[in-house]
């Protein structure tokens, strides 16, 4: 191999709702170099391009009901003990507390 650098396959996250598409570096609950930081859900993580190493952005996760990839933006998903895409949240609207119903 002439080039000693190994070409890495770019991993891409695409939201099923808004179609946001960004590269991610990690999927899980324990982001690397985050000093024992544990997320409440398995999430797609990217390094924060504006901060030093060890800083990260949570960009999305999977809907706990249908499994769709959704970004964490409030127009696409809601988190209430688990992540829900807006479509699934609307379907089970009455199962959420009133405060969460107002966000849906």
Image (cartoon, rainbow, N blue to C red):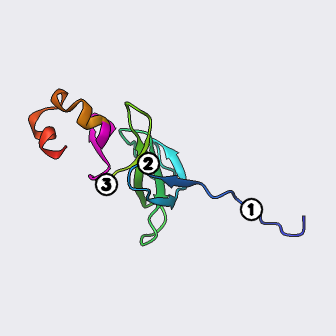
Q: Nearer the viewer, mark 2 or mark 1?
A: 2
At mark 2, the secondary structure is loop
Question: Mark 2 packing: few (<14 Cα in 10 Å), some, or many (20+)?
Answer: some
Single out the residue that lies furthest toward the bottom.
Answer: 50
Above or below, 70 relative to 64: below
Q: Identify the residue at horizontal 31%, vertical 54% (top origin).
A: 73
Above or below, 7 relative to 60: below
User: Sequence-wise, which precedes: disc 3 or disc 2?
Assistant: 2
Query: Magenta segment range?
Result: 74-87
Q: Identify the residue at horizontal 53%, vertical 50% (top origin).
A: 26
The residue that label 2 is drawn on is 16
Above or below, 100 relative to 48: above
C-alpha span from label 2 to label 1: 28 Å
Magenta span has 86? yes
Question: Mark 3 packing: few (<14 Cα in 10 Å), some, or many (20+)?
Answer: few
Residue 68 at x, y percent in the picture = 44, 40
The residue that label 3 is drawn on is 73
Q: Nearer the viewer, mark 3 or mark 2?
A: 2
């Amino acid at each position: 191999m002439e080039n000693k650098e190994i070409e890495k396959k770019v991993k891409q996250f695409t939201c099923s709702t808004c179609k946001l598409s960004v590269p991610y570096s990690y999927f899980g609950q324990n982001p690397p170099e985050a000093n024992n930081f544990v997320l409440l859900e398995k999430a797609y993580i990217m390094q924060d391009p504006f901060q030093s190493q060890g800083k990260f952005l949570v960009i999305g996760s999977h809907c706990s009901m249908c499994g769709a990839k959704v970004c964490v933006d409030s127009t696409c998903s809601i988190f209430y003990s688990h992540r829900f895409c807006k479509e699934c949240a609307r379907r089970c609207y009455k199962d959420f507390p009133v405060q969460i119903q107002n966000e849906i």
